[in-house]
Amino acid sequence: MATTNDIKNGTTLRIDGVLWNVLEFQHVKPGKGGAFVRTKLKNVLTGKIVDRTFNAGAKVEFANVDRRDMEYLYHDGDGYVFMDSQTYDQIQVPEAVVGDDSNFLLENTKVTVATNEGNPLYIELPAAVELEITQTDPGVQGDRSTGGTKPATVQTGATIQVPLFISQGERVKVDTRTGDYLGRVN
């Protein structure tokens, strides 16, 4: 067991059997009373963010989270299969863990898979991916001005908003965190 003095950004704590990532921490020493540590924690499984305060020197349990670079191989009925780039070991990640990230997951995409005691916790996609537009309404003459957007379906089946001048078959760069169009790919 470690103490609250060892808390750093990015560490993972086990509190009441639940894993929490430390987003922010601050050691506070008020003029009157004892010191404490103010933290902002994110639930690893649900994504819920909470503020939590610990007394300085209190015992906390750190969880060992293994982050490995892996390559997405394919989707089968129960989940997504990833392969470790170094050892070529394959693991299956349940659909619930991948969640909405599947909208931007292409075969052979390099991702980071975080596990704790062999159980997949979450995946981290690259900041942006290149996807092909498989379906969108054609642009009409005069729709080339700035500001307008239209829905477009990409090769993974996700729907994103693109400028009016984008046509079917073009490759675009998409932000994986927000789903926003970033630009054309030549």
Image (spheres, grey):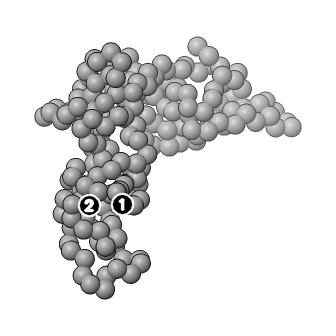
x and y percent of residue 51 in the render? 58, 41
Q: Quadrant of residue 159?
A: bottom left
x and y percent of residue 183 in the render? 39, 61
The disc, 2 or 1, on the residue closer to the chain's N-terminal end is: 2
Q: Nearer the viewer, residue 106 or 103?
A: 106
Left or right side of 185 for 3: right
| Callout 1: SS | strand
Q: Nearer the viewer, residue 70 or 38?
A: 70
| Residue picked out by circle 2 | 170
Left or right side of 53 for 135: left
The crowding category of the residue bearing disc 2, from other C-alpha atoms within 10 Å (few below 14, some 14 to 19, many at least 20), is some
Residue type at mark 1?
Answer: Arg
Left or right side of 139 for 59: right
Q: Which residue is pictured at 62% across the width and 16% down the height? A: 2
Report the quarter where the C terminus lies: bottom left
Q: Quadrant of residue 9?
A: top right
Report the quarter where the N terminus lies: top right
Task: Find out whether the residues at labels 2 and 1 contact each other: C-beta distance under 8 Å.
Answer: yes
Residue type at mark 2?
Answer: Glu
